[in-house]
Image (spheres, rainbow, N blue to C red):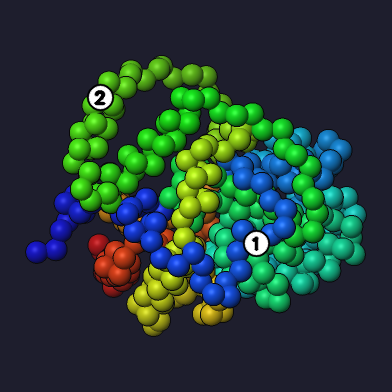
Amino acid sequence: MKPTATERSPLPRSPVLDWSSFSGKPRSAGVSSIDDLRHSVTTTSGRAAIYHALLQLRLPPGSLVLAPSYHCPTMIAPAILAGLEVGYFAIRADGLPHLNSVDAATAGRAKAMIVSHYFGLARSLAEVRQWCDEHRIALIEDCAHCYFGDAGERPVGTWGDFSTASLSKFFPVPEGGVLASAGQALTPLPLSAPGLKAQLKGCVDVLEIAVRHGRLAGVNRLLASVFRLKNTLGKHKATGGGKETSALVRMMQSCDMERISQAPLWATLALKATLPRGPIIARRRQNFAIYARHFAQVRGARALLPPPDADAVPYVFPLWVEEPDRIYHALRAQEFPVFRWDNLWPGTPRLGDDVGPEWSHHVLQLLCHQNLDDSDVTNTALATLSLLANPQA
């Protein structure tokens, strides 16, 4: 009998440490990586990396930074926290910036532009690079979804004056990001060291998540007992409700920017230096291919983009769904590994010829990470197909 949603263990929504994490080839031959960039520093998160990239530019307060209309709020919060103004550009159907959506006056004021490689499916930024050079705008290449692979003619991360990446999207780390540059030396970041308690918590968090998903065979039961005791002793009563806050304040709070000026944890640095990349790359490609086969010809849904280049290392499988709300909320209720960017920054405008607003509503991002096996991905796809085939479900 097929397990129900309540009987099935939730699938991990991010990479999880297990014994197999330490085995495999260090790197798949010929695959580029953010690791290859000449100048780099590890941060606490991808959003921290964006924040420090903006600080590297030494922009005057209130300078204009261009950002995509289709975004995660953690792409916008760093600019606000850095005291900068944010303007928006439209997104084309291929995921690249619609440069004509930026008028001459705005382009003349802009000092920086954040451009993302969505879904881990990187594309050439040659046109964007040329446009930024012509307008003397610094390009920040957001590789949060794209730690590996090539972006057209160049490796990922090498189009921008600075590039930023997220470690926690690709590795089983408690936190982590990367600020890098292919050509510019980085000004040392004024990062404060986390305390011993935070360091130990980072190590415990990695193990606890692994045990929660049963990934440490031989010690799962023992460690589960330890963590249950820890959590029982650590329970405390919730504090009373505070004052009402504005949507902008709530959005900033949800972005969790508190640790952007701290150095990364020992656990992050150790795992980043130790874990082989080969299995991560191979498994993500395999999971993406499984999704692609299931959604090749489906009524009510389609792959958002054409098949990726052979060297792509996907973060998610982007699925366009005609009736997204019902499907998305049902999948989330069943704890499948899916999300969407439906929480845009307050004040994000609606621009002409912009797919951003439609993507934020219609595009479901089905996770492809290496700790999902064939059956996990297949079950996620079949659950989605069942919902598509049964409008009353």
Q: Is residue 286 left or right of residue 357?
A: left
Can you give x and y, in whole percent of width and height, for residue 248 in the image?
61, 35
Picture quadrant of residue 115: bottom right
Q: Is residue 303 left or right of residue 206?
A: right
Return the residue at label 1.
36
User: In front here: 375 or 17?
Assistant: 17
Return the residue at label 2.
232
Can you give x and y, in whole percent of width and height, for residue 230 in the image?
28, 26
SS class, disc 2? helix
Q: Residue at x 69, y 42 (%)?
A: 51
273 shown above or below 228? below
In the rendered image, the quadrant that contains the N terminus is bottom left
* Res 372 label: none
285 shown above or below 173? below
In the rendered image, the quadrant that contains the C terminus is bottom left
Which residue type does callout 1 highlight? Answer: Asp
User: In front here: 41 or 345?
Assistant: 41
> Taking the image as drawn, is residue 114 in sight?
no
Q: Residue at x 60, y 29 (%)?
A: 193
